[in-house]
């Protein structure tokens, strides 16, 4: 079963074990674990995963980001492989999240979701967690279908965690999935609380349903391109006047074919940043075909965009 159960009592054997463990804890030397948290006050972007689908020697996790407000992790954007580990290293708490959003459901953006959900069993979350992502098509599932395929009962890959999604079962919190319809013309702005406002718009990532995201929080705004090639020119509408834009530097300028149909080259990133009038640009989703070409990438971007450009690494923090 996925959710917590309350045990009313322990047998004597259990008591002896607890006493023994207490002695062990007292006698053990203290072992410190370094934290890579961002600063306490204000709004911060933290990069949990700055890589793509490759397994690179530099150990980059796949795409994932946290938005922090006053020392609390309020939004998780994508959950690529390795992001759950870096979430722990960042000092973030799952119970502080107001929402999770997905740009799309390629493996390098979603693989660690089951790890996050299972780990939450051992945390203190008690409020339902909204999870937003794209609607589906013949190639990719919708957000609700994706959740059902992972956690649904009886046929989900991890159906033992079905308590987290099944409304007929009791759980200390529920994951509530929401499909964002395809629309490249109009910004969706369907979630807001007293801390954050979340918006999205459809972007072109080949034949796949994909979204760009924006969060307005603490008087600042951060936009996330997700994977896209720029053909719809929809990101500029969403990201207009953002304090920071996270754009994916997955291909070099020379890319053609499938890679170019899926991703923006540096020159397009620069034009998007210029037309959206963003204050700062952070390049992520870095891959072997772009790592080592930062000088050329920066020069191509700066032909259009003259603001600050940074190349992301895992656990980097950017203060707004």
Image (cartoon, grey):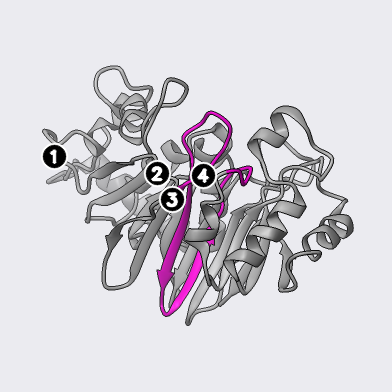
Q: Is residue 47 magenta?
A: no
Distance from the alpha carbon under mark 3 to that under mark 1: 34 Å
Q: Secondary structure at mark 4?
A: loop
Residue range of the region highlighted in magenta in the rendering? 202-231
Q: Earlier in the sequence, mark 2 or mark 3?
A: 2
Distance from the alpha carbon under mark 4 to that under mark 1: 37 Å
Residues at circles 4 and 1 in contact by the CB criterion of under 8 Å: no
Instruction: State the residue at coordinates (47%, 22%).
Output: 139
Is residue 27 visible in the rendered structure shown here?
A: no
Across and down, in percent, residue 261 comes to: 66, 34
In the rendered image, the quadrant that contains the C terminus is bottom right
Q: Which residue is mark 2?
A: 183
Q: Which label sits in the foreground, 3 or 1?
A: 3
Residues at circles 4 and 3 in contact by the CB criterion of under 8 Å: yes
Q: Which residue is mark 4?
A: 203
Across and down, in percent, residue 188 comes to: 35, 53
Is residue 143 visible in the rendered structure shown here?
A: yes
Q: Which residue is mark 3?
A: 201
| Relative vertical location of residue 214 with respect to residue 266 in this rendering, above or below | below
Label 1 crowding class (10 Å Cα cut-off): few <14, some 14-19, many 20+? Answer: some
Q: Secondary structure at mark 2?
A: loop
Q: Secondary structure at mark 1?
A: loop
Label 3 crowding class (10 Å Cα cut-off): few <14, some 14-19, many 20+? Answer: many
Q: Earlier in the sequence, mark 4 or mark 1?
A: 1
| Relative vertical location of residue 53 with respect to residue 92 in this rendering, above or below | above
């Amino acid at each position: 079963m996925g959710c917590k159960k309350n045990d009313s009592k322990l047998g004597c054997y259990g008591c002896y074990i607890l006493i023994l463990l207490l002695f062990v804890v007292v006698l053990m030397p203290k072992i410190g674990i370094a934290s890579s948290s961002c600063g306490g006050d204000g709004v911060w972007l933290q990069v949990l995963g700055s890589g793509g689908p490759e397994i690179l020697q530099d150990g980059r996790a796949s795409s994932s980001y946290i938005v922090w407000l006053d020392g609390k992790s309020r939004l998780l954007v994508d959950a690529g492989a390795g992001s759950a580990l870096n979430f722990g290293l960042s000092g973030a708490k799952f119970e502080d999240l107001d929402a999770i959003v997905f740009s799309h459901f390629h493996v390098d953006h979603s693989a660690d979701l089951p790890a996050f959900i299972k780990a939450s069993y051992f945390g203190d979350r008690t409020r339902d967690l909204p999870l937003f992502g794209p609607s589906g098509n013949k190639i990719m599932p919708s957000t609700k279908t994706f959740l059902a395929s992972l956690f649904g009962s009886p046929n989900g890959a991890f159906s033992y965690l079905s308590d987290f999604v099944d409304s007929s079962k009791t759980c200390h919190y529920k994951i509530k999935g929401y499909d964002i319809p395809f629309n490249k013309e109009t910004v969706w702005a369907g979630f807001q609380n007293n801390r954050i406002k979340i918006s999205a718009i459809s972007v072109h990532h080949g034949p796949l349903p994909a979204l760009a995201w924006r969060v307005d929080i603490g008087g600042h705004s951060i936009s996330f391109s997700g994977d896209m090639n720029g053909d719809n020119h929809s990101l500029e509408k969403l990201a207009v006047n953002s304090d920071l834009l996270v754009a994916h530097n997955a291909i070099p300028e020379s890319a053609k074919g499938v890679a170019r149909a899926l991703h923006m080259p540096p020159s397009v990133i620069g034009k998007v940043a210029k037309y959206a009038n963003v204050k700062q640009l952070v390049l992520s989703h870095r891959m072997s075909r772009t790592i080592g070409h930062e000088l050329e990438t920066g020069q191509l971007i700066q032909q259009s965009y003259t603001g600050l450009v940074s190349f992301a690494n895992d656990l980097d923090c950017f203060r707004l």
